[in-house]
Amino acid sequence: MVRGRVRGALVVGAALAVSVVGQWRSSAPADLATEQATASTVARALARSESDVEIATERYDAALVALAQDRHMVALLDAQLHEEQARLGRLRTELRGQALHEFATAGGASTVAAVLAGSPSDAAIVQADVGVVASRELELEAAFEAASLQLAARRRALEATERQASQTLSAAQSAREAALADEAQLQHELAVVQGDLAALAQAQAAARAAVSQPVTSALATALPAQAPPVASGSALAQAAAIAEAIAARGDTGYLFGAAGQWYDGVQYFDCSGLVTYVYAQAGIELVHDAAGQYAASTPISAAELQPGDLVFYETLGASSIDHVAIYVGGGEVVEATTPGRPVSLDPIGWSGTPVAYGQP
């Protein structure tokens, strides 16, 4: 019964997840932030669904083993009952043979002759021997009947257990198939969301590209002509070098909420996740949030920027910081921007006009 309740909970939970995902897709994507949140939620639902599939598969395998064990026990019991029947037959044969031998040899030829002549005393002896044999056969019959009843009861109990195991196996198989179907549906929904993200990202990238050149030119007058000298061993210099090295690799990608996780040979980041990862390598601990990273930094001006400092943006126009990049000098930053695009070395204005600068 516990297994049934657990299985039911798995199926209901997965069905609810798929139902909610279906509601997400009931309208066209509104904006990049909403789609990113949706992708994150679908990814979490998919992870839970994969866990459900694993649990359902384990229950299915366990039910298979239990059913095989029950069937093996029934086969053993049938063999035991057959052996009991054979043993009874052997005992009957031995008993009758022994009785005949005793009758034939007990009194010799005179006894046989007397019996043939109809002697009352010898006839009584024969009658007694026959009675003994019959009594022992009745005892054997009773013992066999008792053993047969006991074995039959055990067989009925095992057959009931086997039927229950078969039902459990069927339920486990259904739960596994349902979990696999839900997982496939969630994978499809995640692909749809990621496609929407890619389309929104392309549109946003085109808009950014249209304004990046004039923004970069305007910023050039505010940026220092030459970055202040930085000690080669400083944490900020190390962070800038690490960021440039990551951007040069080409095996990176954007995934909302990621901070350096690898999947199928690709290392994924979002904007603040890249900053958290890079600065951790340089020995500086930062929260995984663009606004939080700004709050934890020392504000500086554009003229004070040096490699390793942070550049903050309001890309969604919500009057709040929602994007961060790592300044590496020469008017360029390293940033994680949109799905389908690796970590890149961009002009400082590629993601829009910076709204703040900070030093970790």
Image (cartoon, rainbow, N blue to C red):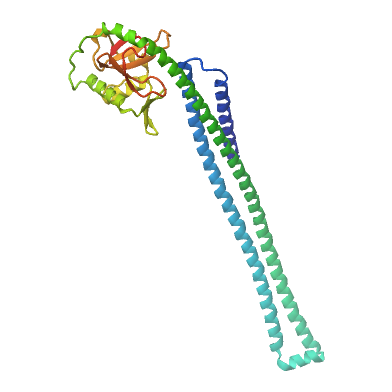
- Quadrant where the N terminus is found in the figure: top right
- Horizontally, residue 225 falls left or right of residue 336, namely left
Q: Nearer the viewer, residue 117 or 248?
A: 248
Q: Kindly identify the residue that appears in the image at 57 percent across and 52 percent down.
A: 68
Q: Nearer the viewer, residue 314 or 95?
A: 314
Which quadrant of the structure image shows residue 258? Answer: top left
Q: Kindly identify the residue that appears in the image at 69 percent across and 60 percent down.
A: 149
Horizontal and vertical percent position of residue 270: 38, 22
Horizontal and vertical percent position of residue 346: 32, 17
Horizontal and vertical percent position of residue 181: 56, 34
Q: Is residue 124 above or below residue 69?
A: below
- Quadrant where the C terminus is found in the figure: top left
Q: Nearer the viewer, residue 194 or 310?
A: 194
Q: Is residue 106 above or below residue 260?
A: below
Q: Is residue 259 visible?
A: no
Q: Is residue 121 above or below residue 335?
A: below
Horizontal and vertical percent position of residue 315: 40, 12
Which quadrant of the structure image shows residue 316? Answer: top left
Q: Is residue 94 visible?
A: yes
